[in-house]
Every structure is written in C-alpha cells, then in structure tokens.
Image: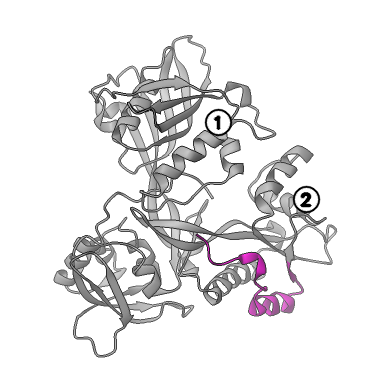
Amino acid sequence: MASIDPLTLPLDDTSAADLAANGLDYARVDADGPGFRPFQRAVARGFLGAESSDDEAENARLTLRTRRLTGVFDRSAIEPEVPVGTVDSWVAPLTTSPGRQLDMWSISAVTVAPTHRRRGIARAMLGGELRTAAAAGAALAGLTVTEATIYGRWGFSPATWASDVVVDTRRARWAGPTAPGRLDFVPREGLAARISAVHERVRVQRPGSVPGWDGRWRGLAGTAPGDKEAEKVRAVVYRDTEGVERGILVYTIAEAESFTAHELNVRALFADGGEATAALWRFAIEHDLVAQVKAWLQPPVPPVQWMVVDRRAVTATLTDHQWLRVLDVPQALASRRYSAPLDVVLRVSDPLGFAEGDWHVRVDDGGEALVERAGDASAEVVTGGVNALGSLLLGGVRASELAEAGALGGSAHALAAIDRSFAPAMTPLLDIWY
C-alpha cells in the first residue's frame, strides 16, 4: 500500500545544520555497508542489550535493509564509526477502522548515547523525521515507546492501549463458549508464515494495527538466531469448520519447582473472531500442569476476563503502547469511518506547525468525513493541541475525558458529538512492537 519510499528521500537540512553546529555529523547508514554493525552496536547499547552475533546481525539485516537508517556521529570520539544517536523509519499501513488503512511514517530504534545527552541529538533526529515525513506527504507518524515522558514534545500522544495479562488457572474455571472447530499442533518449520497469515487476517479489521514483518515472525516462532528458548517453542492453530486457520497460539512453558505449577508464556495469540479467541484461550488455561498463563499486548479489556467463572483470576495491567502524531489533518481524519454525523471546527495548536489551524470536520450519515480549512464555518469550535488530536484519531480515548484533563476545550454538546462520532467499531489495539 505504501506510496512513499523513505529510502529515496534526502536527509533534513535543518537537522543537519543544527547537529553540525554542535560538532556532530548527520548521515544515512547502509544496511549492506560497513556502518551497519556499528549502528547495531549503538542501538543495543541504547536499549541495554547485548551485541549481536554474526548470525543475529545477518538476520536483522534482512529486515533493516528495507528501512531508512540514520545515525548521528561524533567524529572525534574513540569509536567515530559508532553513532551517538540512531533512528530507523519506514512507511507501513495503519488500520484506522475495519477495512480502512492510512500510510504511516513508522519510527523505531531511537537512541541517544548517555555520553552525548543534552546536545540536541533527539530534537534533531525526531524533528528531521517529522519534517521529512510531512514533506513526502505522510499524514501520520507513529512509534511504540519505552519511556512515556519523551515524545509528547514532538506532538506524539497515546492512541492505543494494551494489557499484559496474567491468569491464575487454578481459579479460572472455563465458562466461555465451546468453539466448533478444532485445534492442532503445528511444527516450527513454516510457523513464521502461519503467524503472518493469521495476523494479516486480524490486523486489517482492528484499528491501530500495522503489518508485521518476516523478522518479527521468525522471532516469535523461535527460528531467529540467538533465541535461547527456541527449542521450547510450541504452537497450535485453530481451524474453523471449513478448515480455515483463524487463530494461532505460540507459547513456551517455564518449569516451576512444583511439577503441577508451571508457567505458560504466550509469545503470540492472534485470533480472527470469537471462536478462535475462545478456543485458544481455553487451550492455554486448561493446559496440563500449568498454574499461570502470561500474555502480553492483549486488548485493553481482554476477552478472557468474560470467559472464566472468577474473572478476578485474570489480572490485566494496562499501558499505553502506540503513540501517534498527526501531520496532515484532512488526510488523517478522512482515513477512517465514523459512527455518527458530526459538524464541528477543530482549532488545533501545533508548536511545530504541521497541523496548526482551524479545521471544519463534517461527517455525513454514511460515516465519511470531509475536512477543510474552516474559513467562515459557523459550527461549534473545539480547541486542543495536536497531541490530543493524535489520541482522538482512532477513538481510543473520548473527547470528554480529554476535556476533563484540560487537553480539549469546548461545549459539552460539541464534546458529546465528537464522542458519538469518533466511537470506534472495535477497540483500537496494536498487538506487536515496532
């Protein structure tokens, strides 16, 4: 779907000049060139990881050669080839409502060496990414975050939330439906492709989802180099009564001292529909000799809570996961379907200027939006920053809640109208890291 090729775009002149004024170089890194391993070393340092082996580096190269890798370099350092700042980016389709997608400038691997803090590196890298994306016509930028205090200054804000789920199987007696299809174990050979196929079925229907990539699926399948638990990986698929694979569960078992109290750790649980969801969760909860099931990046209110007798046997810890930054207001808002008509003016403030302005948003009876510069529109005005607009976009947060927090201003009538219109057909979720 992507109509923008980041690999063809030049580096941002403003960022290059700002970094040069601080004695730093701003340069692209070729994934097939000698700078790739030093780039990886810098990323590993930034995320407190170990340096990669040759096999791990070659596995990563398969993914990263299709991405835009950018480094900031201190040529006077002892290791001048190792960047002191890193970022990689690519364009991927974000599902904005079931069956609707929008190209998003995806950002990852943002690191700054602790030896080079407070030298404007992050400001230059993130500003450069946004200016490049906007100039190329991207309506939206997105990232997943390890720290929640960094990215708001560039206009990013949480748009999807996810839960880390822990189930005490000794209390979680099954009360959910019995799926009519069947479960089967599948081998690790070909497992990555199976994960990809099911995830693709799911992600085009779920707002907030993006496609995965081969490296992500190999990692979940235990077929990527360096996976210390690869031999423990098991997987089952759910097939409906027509024989279609609609769900997949990939997991490992962590042994406990008590032979009946092992821990089942879910690497992936992707399900196309309620039947598959119920079948896979029931398999996990009723697994022999397992006392606890752990799963990450599940829906904010995980369906399994409604499928057991004692719903307090399920602990769900909610966290913000994907942050979005609107660059083109008309394009971003028109990319999704809406649940009710709407006629308001959004007065958006944006310190970086991309989304600044008064925007007349009209949603018709069919849920389609027309967004234009407001001009002399007589509709009610709702005011807020670009951060609030990013959180509103997919419907994962209500306008009235943002107003209570002081992030939006407007009449109760206008805020309620936005709540009705922006209500999502399905709770937004991003179920992978990127």
Q: Which residue is mark 2?
A: 37
Colour pattern: one colour
The residue segment tinted magenta is: 1-27
Sequence order check, earlier mark of 1 and 2: 2
Residue 295 point in image, percent of width and height: 43, 33
User: Could you say which is closer to the camera, residue 360 or residue 14?
Assistant: 360
Whether residue 154 sits left or right of residue 112 in the image: it is: left
Residue 26 painted magenta: yes
Residue 93 point in image, percent of width and height: 47, 57
- Secondary structure at badge 2 equals helix
Q: Which residue is at 36% across, 62% downward?
A: 391
Whether residue 143 sits left or right of residue 180 in the image: it is: right
Q: Which residue is mark 1?
A: 191
The total number of labels drawn is 2
Residue 10 painted magenta: yes
Is 299 drawn above or below residue 267 in the view shown? below
Is 12 drawn above or below residue 77 in the view shown? below
Q: Which residue is at 44% across, 27% downward?
A: 237
Callout 2 amino acid: Arg
Q: Which residue is at 46% across, 80% downward?
A: 353
Q: CA distance from mark 1 to mark 2?
A: 28 Å
The crowding category of the residue bearing disc 1, from other C-alpha atoms within 10 Å (few below 14, some 14 to 19, many at least 20), is many
Residue 144 point in image, percent of width and height: 50, 53
User: Could you say which is closer to the camera, residue 169 or residue 9?
Assistant: 9
